[in-house]
Image (cartoon, rainbow, N blue to C red):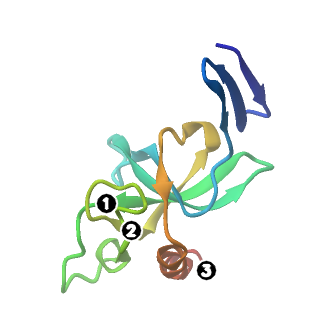
Amino acid sequence: MKTAKFQSILTIQKKKNGWKINLPPQPGEIYDAFFQYDDGTGGKYRPVLVMETDSGLFVAVAIKVTTSKPIKGYTDPIHTSRLLIKDWKAAGLSKKSYAQCSTFDLFKYVHLKRYIGKLTSSDFQDIYNEYLKYTS
């Protein structure tokens, strides 16, 4: 298999049945990525939602996606910032999931691994508006 790389964000692969092109991530897309634990003791691969990208630096800001629903009565942003991804099946997620808008990190494009899917525009707009509350 032949592979050509351009500026480490675009890969084109020659396959038996044609070509496969991997484009840079876009806001609203969900990928698997290694996400650090808050206490710094490690982390794990989990779905992340791309919120913003910088093609000049080849990085994306992405927020944590979790299956843990918010706990009523808790005032910590970890719980209050969780918004239900209403169309989670359409987004390629296997379980009912929440975007944790207060928990985000910077990822190099190459660290966004398996593409999972893309949010509906309605879900993305709701989540983006909540995310802005934690970045302003």
Name the residue type under label 3. Answer: Ser
Q: CA distance from mark 2 to mark 3?
A: 16 Å
> Dividing the image into 4 quarters, which one contains the C terminus?
bottom right
> For mark 1, what is the residue?
66
Name the residue type under label 2. Answer: Gln
> For mark 2, what is the residue?
100
> Dividing the image into 4 quarters, which one contains the N terminus?
top right
Question: Tag 2, which secondary structure?
Answer: strand
N-term mark: 1 or 3: 1
**Mark 1 surroundings: few (<14), some (14-19) or many (≥20) residues within 10 A:** many
**The one of 16 and 39 positioned closer to us in this rendering:** 16
Name the residue type under label 1. Answer: Thr
Question: Tag 1, which secondary structure?
Answer: strand
> For mark 3, what is the residue?
136
Residue in the picture at 50% in, 38% down:
113
From this viewpoint, which residue is outermost toward the front? 17
Number of marks in the rendered image: 3
Residue in the picture at 64% in, 57% down:
26
The percent position of residue 22, horizontal first and vertical second, equals 65, 38
N-term mark: 2 or 1: 1
